[in-house]
Amino acid sequence: MIYYLIFIIILLVVVILSDTNTWSPFQSEQVKEICSRMTRGERRAAIKRGALWGLLIGIIPGSIGLICGPIIFRSALLGVMFCALITPLIAFVLWKKWLPHVNKSQQTFLASTEWARSQGIKADGIRLFSWQK
């Protein structure tokens, strides 16, 4: 049990000490510019969106493993491990369907910020990652 607490404490320290203006080293310069000019409310909304996606990505497979693990494998740990192994496979299969919607949602959110609206930036014109054209 103590191992889980250590992991959570490390995550909290990283979040507290990290710079919230840039979320990823792979962001395009345009996204970095928009993020650096977000208002406090917009930044709070962006952090909530990121936390929600993180919870969904972690809780859904974990809860399925904890619920189905004892039934199928007679062990919650084996169920969680099975879900940890199968989740990347499912994500890879759904990538073509799911990722464009997530990216479009992120572009729409970034284009709705006060600074982006004042600059006339449209959602379709935002490059999320540095390698996108």
Image: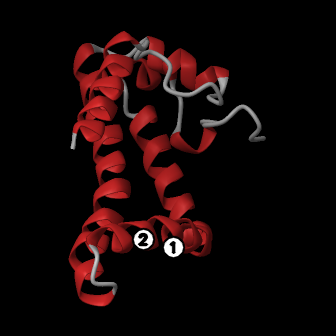
Image height of 81 relative to 23, above or below: below
Q: Secondary structure at mark 2?
A: helix
Displayed quadrant of residue 66: bottom left
Image height of 81 relative to 16, above or below: below
Image height of 1 relative to 69, above or below: above
Q: Residue at x 50, y 42 (%)?
A: 107
Q: Residue at x 27, y 25 (%)?
A: 9
Query: What is the C-alpha distance between the residues marked 1 and 2?
Result: 5 Å
Q: Secondary structure at mark 1?
A: helix
Q: Amino acid at mark 2?
A: Cys
Name the side, left or right, on which 31 lies relative to 130: left
Can I make out residue 97 in this image? no
**Which part of the image, by quadrant, shows the N terminus?**
top left
Displayed quadrant of residue 39: top left
* Mark carried by residue 112: none
**Which part of the image, by quadrant, shows the C terminus?**
top right
Asked whether disc 1 touches disc 2, contact meaning CB atoms under 8 Å apart, the reply is yes
* Mark 1 crowdedness (10 Å alpha carbons): few <14, some 14-19, many ≥20: few
